[in-house]
Image (cartoon, rainbow, N blue to C red):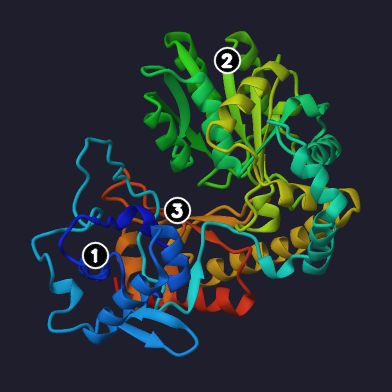
Amino acid sequence: MLPYKNLIVINKKSSVAVYRQLALQFINLIQEGKLLPGTELPSTRTLANDLQLHRKTIMAAYNALVTEDWVDNLPRKGYAVSPRLPVVRPRSYNTNRLGAYKGISGFMFEKLETVFYPSVSLAKSRIVVNDGFPDISLLPTEAIIKEYRSVLEHATLNRIGTEWNAEGSTDFRKSLCSFLNQTRGMDIGMENLLTSRGAQMAIYVAASLIIQPGDKVVVCDPSYLLASMLFEQLGAELIRVPIDEQGMCTEPLEEILKNNDVRLLYVIPHHHHPTTVTLSAQRRNHLLQLIKAHDLAVIEDDYDYDFQFQYDPYLPLASGDHGGNIIYIGSLTKVLGTPFRLGYMIATQEFIQSAAKLRALIDLRGEVLMEQTVAGLIDNGELARHIKKANRLYAERCNFLSDLINNELSDVVDFTKPTGGMALWLKFRHAYPLSKIIKKAGTMGLAFTGSVYNEEINGGLNACRFGFASLQDEEMKEAVSILRKAADTI
């Protein structure tokens, strides 16, 4: 309800009757668009109490408004602004006046205009190929509901409602530390872990503590676009290092470190985004040597480590000997699905303490209810079972899609089947401009919402990510068929 006590001012010394003053001010509120057609007015008793007027005065004003067709008297409901306003509709009043938010801002600000994902219409799309997101139909929903319900029990809810830790839920951090130590070969305690609403927030917080305007930051070429944009937004100068089928090229990196004062290195050793390649063992060892030799701050983005299709996957760089220089960032969003914004950061205790203080400026409590729920899923083994089931299915879908593309599009695209993850990196040959392919595919019901690199705007790169984890076999068949037809029209 509007604050009528502040909006309506009665002058008891005026020659205009009080009830009429009240009616006229209601008419002004309607004309200004503050009271829209159908809006219920306060009861006569409530308004009389707010304005310190006699109830009969309020009734007289309302009756006048009803008589003039500004207001309807609805049986058993009270009074409401009429949808049939007299003579001139409210939107015709004050035609030279713009609403407060209808124009442009009256102050200067930085306009972020970079488009990091293609703008596509999904209205006519039968199939949507994303960047590589999980299949949420695999979620153990009954187990999640059970854990969530237990969190909402009074004793638990009261405890987590009164307990506050800047680093995140105590139960979640304890469970997550155990999970990460077991699956990633780490040796961390709760003091080394900070939770966040997804990995992107964790990257932002870590980078904000390290980067100053003018600092040099090394990334791969290409790299995860949102991270690169973030570093540039903080004022960094990006130095790009080539990447090939063995991951980041560490020999050029060594030369860069010798000749530049590099503030931060951003690396994705597992299933690099966007190319999906995994850093080789030789280069991992070389990179760890460089990190220690140059005392280099590193953000290791390990967004989908849990999905490995081989029996002897590499451990994260952060599990090695790096002298505390690696900030390890991961996410459970890739495990549970995009609606679950659960990320985390692992670093030395002193860095986590500063990161927690910074995060509190933008996110004071975090996703406490869901953190508690997932803590239960970790403790009862449900999360590990879900990962094992999803990993097996994603490996099958990766093989299925790879075979499809080899059979149907070998003359159009080149790719290397990844050892894990949720997407293929398809490099289209120059005779098949990706912008034209995707535009044509869109008319046939196929949309791409993930990372797309067009030759004309991405320095000759003609490639895209094809997320397979959330697609059924028949959907992948149709998607590849549409790409084939689109390529044949070029």
Q: Which residue is mark 1?
A: 25
Q: Badge 2: few (under 14), some or many (20 or more) residues near its Cα, within 10 Å?
A: many
For residue 187, side relative to residue 113 (left or right): right
Q: Which residue is mark 3?
A: 451
Q: Position of residue 167 (x, y in %)?
A: 70, 31
Is 473 placed above or below 210 here? below
Q: Residue furthest left?
A: 96
How far is mark 1 from mark 3, CA to CA? 55 Å
- Considering the numbered disc 1 on the image, is that residue within a helix, a strand or a loop? helix
Q: Which numbered dot is residue 98? A: none
Regarding residue 328, the answer to whether it shows in the image is yes
User: Residue flagged by tag 2: what amino acid is it?
Assistant: Leu
Q: Earlier in the sequence, mark 1 or mark 3?
A: 1
Q: Nearer the viewer, residue 120 or 479?
A: 120
Is 459 placed above or below 54 here? above
Q: Nearer the viewer, residue 2 or 288?
A: 2
User: Residue flagged by tag 1: what amino acid is it?
Assistant: Gln
Q: Residue visible at 67% across and 66% down?
A: 136
Q: Residue visible at 31% across and 82% down?
A: 63
How far is mark 2 from mark 3, CA to CA? 29 Å
Q: Earlier in the sequence, mark 2 or mark 3?
A: 2
Q: Which residue is mark 2?
A: 296
Q: Position of residue 433 (x, y in %)?
A: 31, 60
Q: Residue furthest bottom?
A: 75
User: Residue flagged by tag 3: what amino acid is it?
Assistant: Ser
How far is mark 2 from mark 1, CA to CA? 67 Å
Quadrant where the N terminus is found in the figure: bottom left
Q: Which image quarter: residue 21? A: bottom left
